[in-house]
Amino acid sequence: MAALSEALARTAPLYDRVSRVIPALEWPVFAGDVDAILTLKRERNAVILAHNYQTPEIFHCVADLVGDSLALARMATQTDADIIVLAGVHFMAETAKLLNPSKTVLIPDLGAGCSLAESITPADVRLIRARHPGVPVVTYVNTSAAVKAESDICCTSGNARAVVESLGVDRVIMIPDEYLARNVAAETRVEIIAWKGHCEVHERFSADEVRQLREDHPGITVLAHPECPPDVVAAADFAGSTAVMSDYVRLRQPARVVLLTECSMSDNVAVQHPGVEFIRPCNLCPHMKRITLKNIRQALEENRHEVTIDPVVAAPARRAVERMLAL
Ligand code: 13P
Ligand code: SF4
């Protein structure tokens, strides 16, 4: 009991940050783990990189660096910590490991996958290349290292169009997200050959839902992630990566907004913008939600689960990621 009251006292300033989205009654459930994680990070010279879809007690209370996939990849190259704990999904941890081969990279739950990463294999990439000889392959970072290894360059939702146009060609193969590919195709003259993968979270939004939102909440600003179907993106006011959506709210301060993306995103952005009203139909990512304070603490205590990548795959996969980062 004494330990909990000490943890509550030490974490009180952190609770203040998230008090708009976490009821005071719930904080004692989190305080002990938050307190322990802060100590473990110091003892082990570890940093926690957290994606924008992590829950607020992770995102605002224990993470050192937060952002979208592109920012996390960049930050992974800049840390001098010995250990990186990736609070996100497996492909993000693999990307951090590709960029930091000599560091320990931990993912708190090995089951934190991604429906896009699951949708394509290295053999599929070889097949699609054989069908379109000479056409470069642009691979979304939401893929395994083995798929990245078959690619010319990676992209994220934050730089997809710039990557496609950087290649100076008329046609590219863009895998595996069909909707991201079609959304980019709508903005560029480069012809895009797409694969048929979908994000199980974003494919559930519909243009009818957007129409209903506008009817129910006049004047609402609708922001969509580019993994949403093209008719949803067309019906939205603006589409961008999770970081770009967050920047939009910060810079424009819309009176009322809806973020068509994963649920924790609104919580995390709402914490920083008390003057903005968030309408919250959202879809949960079951993979992102596998990461909890409990398993982050366990990752640091037990050094698990360490991410390893076959060196034969790692070298070409790293080249594809580094080529993107060099842009
Ligand atoms: P961002 O790169 O926009 O953060 O997207 C990652 C992701 O998994 C979206 O579903
Ligand atoms: Fe993958 Fe979609 Fe979850 Fe992002 S939200 S990690 S794309 S399943």
Image (spheres, rainbow, N blue to C red):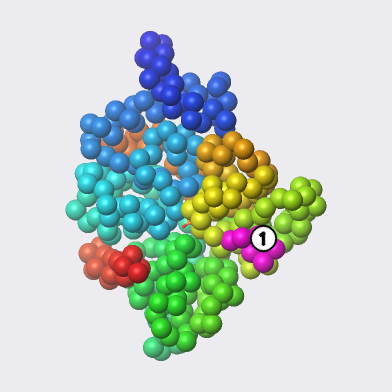
> 277 or 203: nearer the eye?
277
Is the residue at mark 1 in contact range of ligand 1, meaning its CB lies under 8 Å from it?
Answer: no
Residue bounds of the magenta highlight: 233-239
- For this orientation, the residue located farthest to the right is 215
| Residue 134, x across and y down, in percent | 39, 88
Q: Against 167, is 141 above or below? A: above
Residue drawn at the location 28% of the way across and 70% of the way down = 319
Residue flagged by tag 1: what amino acid is it?
A: Ala
Question: For residue 151, which quarter of the picture?
Answer: bottom left
Where does the C terminus fall, quadrant-wise?
bottom left
Residue annotated with mark 1: 236
For label 1, the SS is loop
Q: Which part of the image, by quadrant, shows the N terminus? A: top left
Q: Position of residue 113 (x, y in %)?
A: 45, 54
Q: Is residue 240 above or below residue 147?
A: above
Q: Is disc 1 surrounded by few (<14), some (14 to 19) or many (20+) residues within 10 Å?
A: many
Height in image: 23 above or below 222?
above
Q: What residue is at 41 percent from the left and 13 percent from the top?
A: 5
- Percent position of residue 246, x then y: 52, 50
Judge whether residue 168 can be spotted in this image: yes
- Seen at 35% across and 56% down, the residue is 73
In which image quadrant can residue 188 be found?
bottom right
Which of 50/88 is in front? 50
Q: Residue 253: horizontal and vertical position, in percent? A: 60, 46
